Image (cartoon, rainbow, N blue to C red):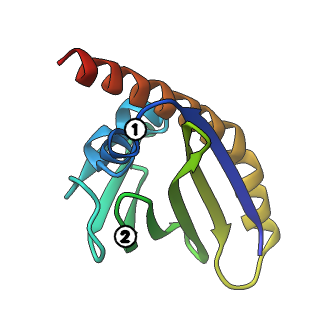
Amino acid sequence: MAQITVSARTTAPTGVAWSVFADARTWSTWAPHIRDTTGAGTVIEGDELTIDSIVPGLGVEARITRVEAPWRWDFELEPLPGLRLVGEHHVRDVGTEREVVSVLRTAGRSSLAGRMVLTAYRPLAALAMRRLARLIDVRSAVALRG
């Protein structure tokens, strides 16, 4: 099994972090590789979403496999034939901050292709987490002024 983990920190309350992280309608605003999501809203266990890439015609079907609001949601998808990935997304309390975490791993036997895909994806995933934390901080500041 190959795996990557990326994270970023925010000072926003847990509820604000969750409301952005778990809302598929926001994914394209912080994940640079996502153009749009179909069938999207706040994730619900069993949801099936179509995630459209910024590359025309390249989209994937994802299924939400677990939700423990406001702390965790998991998914699975097959970005390439024969390559199944599972992911976990967490909001964790770390002292006075929150950490948003994304864990992505190959399912089943780890192949060279799976390790290569995850290795290549790591910088983009790390960028997405940093952008997510900034968006959460902005939403929190707006809510406080509210």
Pick whichever, 110 or 133, lies toward us. Answer: 133
At label 1, counting other C-alpha atoms closer than 10 Å, the crowd grade (few under 14, some 14-19, many 20 or more) is: some
Badge 2 amino acid: Val
Question: What residue is shown with label 1?
Answer: 13
- Circle nearer the viewer, 1 or 2: 1
Question: What residue is shown with label 2?
Answer: 67
- Residue 101, percent across and down? 58, 50
Label 2: state its secondary structure. Answer: strand
Q: Residue at x 34, y 52 (%)?
A: 22
Q: Quadrant of the N terminus?
A: bottom right
Badge 1 amino acid: Pro
At label 2, counting other C-alpha atoms closer than 10 Å, the crowd grade (few under 14, some 14-19, many 20 or more) is: some
Q: Residue at x 42, y 25 (%)?
A: 137
Q: Quadrant of the C terminus?
A: top left
Say above or below: 109 vs 26. Answer: below
- Residue 102, percent across and down? 58, 53
Q: How far is the residue under mark 1 from the one under mark 2?
A: 19 Å
Q: Residue furthest right?
A: 112
Q: Residue furthest bottom?
A: 108
- Residue 36, percent across and down? 30, 42
Pick whichever, 108 or 21, lies toward us. Answer: 21
* Mark seen at residue 40: none
Q: Mark 1–mark 2 contact, CB under 8 Å?
A: no
Q: Is residue 66 left or right of residue 102?
A: left
Q: Residue at x 66, y 67 (%)?
A: 105
Q: Is residue 62 left or right of residue 41?
A: right
Q: Residue furthest top?
A: 145
- Residue 86, percent across and down? 56, 71
Label 1: state its secondary structure. Answer: loop
Quarter of the view holding residue 129: top right
Number of numbered tags placed on the structure image = 2
